[in-house]
Amino acid sequence: MKPARLAVLGIAVVAAGAAVMLVGKARPPAPTIVQQQPAKAVPLAKVLVASTELDIGRTIQDSDLSWQDWPKEAVNSQFIQQSGNAKAEVVGAIVRSPFIQGEPIRSDKLIKGAGSGFMSAILPSGKRALAISISTNGSASAGGFILPNDHVDVIRTYRDEEGSRSAGAEVQVSETVLTNVRVLAIGKQVGEKNGEKVVTGETATLELDPRQVELVVLAGRVGQLSLALRSLADSGSGADATAIDSNTGTTVIRYGVATQATRK
């Protein structure tokens, strides 16, 4: 082998050995230490919450309430904060709107004071509560499936005296008096209880305005009233009960056959 090639090979071997030694002596870079900033403490307040589910109309007991930490910035003006006899003042109040477990107790959802009228408290301004008789077996109230806060149509059924004389047979007429009426209570029950889905009672209390009260009272004196349950999709929470124009027509039953007739 020529001396020049041997020299080049020798230089290459020496360079490779030097590279190996340098790599072996190289130290790994020191790990970067990131110091985490401590979390900022959130100011808390003690607020009164429901320790169990509270249904409409329930009288609050001491065991129904407990104190819970709540972010101060999220405390509503209606929340009840820990101070003095705050908890004792709530005991004995009546639930106006239901609470779920852990929900803060709000003053505007309670009725306080001995002798407070619960029904009058849940009535919106300008409305009246009117109780009408319904059959105990539910035959005149959607088979007993109407619950408080459902919406119904009020239907009157009566005997058409003139039509009966003309036809020489019994003629029954039915007409819708009001539509989309809110049911406040069935019997003395104003809300579901223990998940019960079927409520029966001898009366249904309806939410009406003064003019509608007159209409329903009169209709009940000259006929039998029935309630027809409306679909939830048809009974928007903002919709008011509507009176039906008596000239639009009625259902007349002759010999068991129903026909539509315009009232004169």
Image (spheres, rainbow, N blue to C red):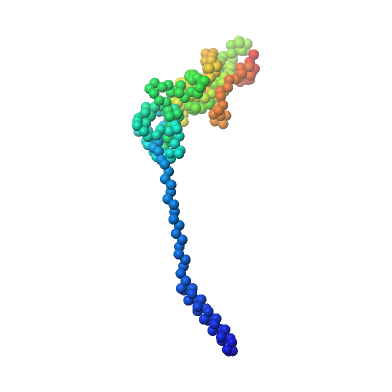
From this view, report whether residue 149 is shown above or below residue 218. below
Q: In which image quadrant can residue 179 be found?
A: top right
Residue 63 in the image: x percent, y percent?
35, 33
Is residue 61 among the parts visible in the rendering?
no
Residue under the point 37% across and 36% down: 67
Is residue 31 among the parts visible in the rendering?
yes
Q: In which image quadrant can residue 88 be found?
A: top left
Q: Nearer the viewer, residue 102 or 5?
A: 5
Q: Is residue 173 left or right of residue 17?
A: right
Look at the image and tell me in which quarter the C terminus lies.
top right
Q: Nearer the viewer, residue 49 or 164?
A: 49
Residue under the point 41% across and 33% down: 80
Q: In which image quadrant can residue 30 be found?
A: bottom left
Residue 25 in the image: x percent, y percent?
46, 73
Residue under the point 37% across and 27% down: 92
Residue 114 in the image: x percent, y percent?
38, 22
Residue 34 in the image: x percent, y percent?
45, 57
The mark tally for this picture is 0
Look at the image and tell me in which quarter the N terminus lies.
bottom right
Q: Nearer the viewer, residue 243 or 204?
A: 243
Residue under the point 54% across and 84% down: 10
From this view, report whether residue 115 is shown above or below residue 26. above
